[in-house]
Amino acid sequence: METLNFRFENGRTRIAPHANMVGVVGSGNLEVLIEPAELNGGCEVEVKTAAVGFAAIWQAVMADFHLRWSLADVRISINDVGATPAVVSLRLDQAVESVTEASA
């Protein structure tokens, strides 16, 4: 197992005041927990992954995610069992949509 941590600053998009989880931990998949947190406008992401040695790919996927959503005061926890970058992006988008649609 490897744990990776990312932080992005100066987000613009806030989420609903409740947490939500999407996805299922299983072979080739992952789960994402998204929750509001007081982070001075930042977004923190913690990834726990069984696929060791892919930090650069995770960094690229997380940077792309931040460009799409620019989240503020959000903490995201990811439990991964070897999901592809496309699946990671899909689950992250589902997580954000689950807490932004509810607040709209």
Image: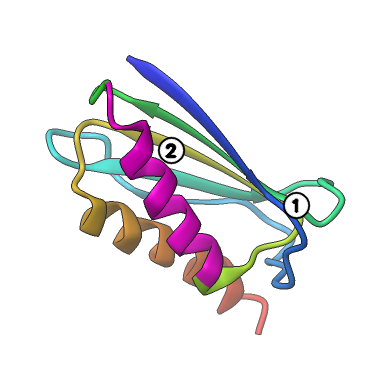
Q: Nearer the viewer, residue 31 or 85?
A: 85
Q: Residue 42 has which mark?
A: 1
Q: Position of residue 69 (x, y in %)?
A: 56, 70
Q: Which residues fall within the magenta stretch?
A: 53-67
> Disc 2 residue type?
Ile
Circle 1 Cα neighbour tier, 10 Å, few/some/many (<14 / 14–19 / ≥20): some
For the question of whether residue 11 can be seen, the reply is yes
Q: CA distance from mark 1 to mark 2?
A: 17 Å
Decide which of tag 1 and tag 2 comes sooner along the chain.
1
For the question of whether residue 95 can be seen, the reply is no
Q: Is residue 69 left or right of residue 95?
A: right
Say which residue appears at 46% left-offset and 52% top-offset. Answer: 62
Circle 2 Cα neighbour tier, 10 Å, few/some/many (<14 / 14–19 / ≥20): many
Q: Nearer the viewer, residue 84 or 34?
A: 84
Q: Position of residue 56 (x, y in %)?
A: 36, 38
Q: Is residue 73 above or below residue 104?
A: above
Disc 1 is placed on an element classified as: loop
Q: Residue furthest left?
A: 27
Q: Is residue 95 magenta?
A: no
